[in-house]
Amino acid sequence: MRMQDLGYTLRHTDERTAARRGTLRTAHGEVQTPTFMPVGTRGTVKAMTSALLESLGAQIVLGNTYHLYLRPGAELIARAGGLHEFMNWHHPILTDSGGFQIFSLADTLKLSDDGVEFYSILDGSKHFWTPEENIRIQELIGADIIMQLDQCPPYPADKEDVACAVELSLKWARQCKEAHMRDDQMLFGIVQGGVHNDLRLRSVQGLVDIGFDGYGIGGYSVGEPHEMMLESLPAVCEALPHNKPRYLMGVGSPTSMLEAIGRGVDMFDCVLPTRTARMGTAFSSQGRMNLRNAQYADDLTPLDPECSCDTCAHHSRAYLRHLVTTKEMLGAILLSQHNVHYLLDLTARAREAIEQDRYGEFLTAWRESPAADDY
């Protein structure tokens, strides 16, 4: 794909909601939106091979700059030909800047206007990231989409502190934009502002003035009430450019995604499907299922009769419970396969509903179904 062809095309907006259908063009192929992006923090989506992800229809996966920088190191990944070659995934990749991971370790960092000093979770070694250094590392890793370095304040936080984080993130956004040199990568800015709508809109305006290839909506899923996120999303989405993708960071429960799609969001990521799978929990048309529960011990029916994945086609609830309770690694593999398929299939059905101008009905039917009980 020629570099001038990179970008986003808005193909259709649902007649009765803000739900959007688009195509994101990257150096490693197209991504049809709305989409869910499985998380491969350290260069692997846990318990899943690249071939399995392809078979499930995954279009794009995530890597995390913080973890990949600490181990195995950005320089090694670059020598391997970039993250695509290193992990044998030849489709689009997005890397988060790692800012969320740094700021989640608040007791071990020192923040300044110039950047952030932090200590490795692996060996305690000290590191200092400027926005420019963060971009350099992400360029070495070589993802198709990279994110600016930003400050993500916790919840709750004083509004004054959140306002300072917005301004610092905007300052760093300008520096990231100026430092970014690879024309085969797209650079996204990140909206901050906590639960304060005026600060969110201030962040949006500042980022739009700088100009990015797309926009992450960050600072959610950090402990705030779920309703606050949903209430503030419409204003944020409306203020963002309609011809650029919108990525709600760290959100991946089925109901949250569908509600956010109806408010104008295009992209999602979350560790939820694979993390819950490793804990023995599955998404289903009947709501979340904890396979550790004794009620499934003699249940020879499929995991979810309405699901078309291989796990549901070939394995019973009783067998999956057996794997979970005996801590066999196959249990995590099969449940991860199912949960990721579940979210990929859900977003595919959302795309179809948007194209047919029936997303409102699709969302209403979901809200009224047992599957909606997934928070």
Image (tube, helix red, strand yellow):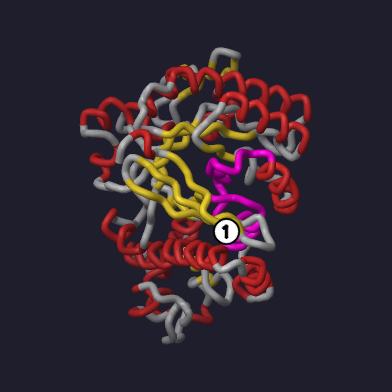
Q: Where is residue 27 shown, x and y percent of the image?
A: 33, 40
Q: Is residue 253 magenta?
A: yes
- Which residue: 27% across, 34% down? 82
Q: Where is residue 363 shown, x and y percent of the image?
A: 64, 67
Label 1 neighbour load within 10 Å: few <14, some 14-19, many 20+: some
Q: Range of the magenta residues?
A: 239-266
Q: Is residue 367 positioned above or below 151 on the image?
A: below
- Which residue: 38% across, 72% down? 309
Could you tell me the amino acid type at mark 1?
Answer: Ser
Q: Where is residue 84 shown, x and y percent of the image?
A: 28, 41
> Horizontal placement of 308 versus 246: left or right?
left
Q: Is residue 249 magenta?
A: yes
Viewer-side residue, 13 vs 72: 13
Give the position of the C terminus as an image quadrant.
bottom right
- Which residue: 72% across, 34% down? 201
In this view of the protein, can residue 63 be seen by the observer? Answer: yes
Q: Residue furthest left?
A: 80
Viewer-side residue, 359 vs 171: 359
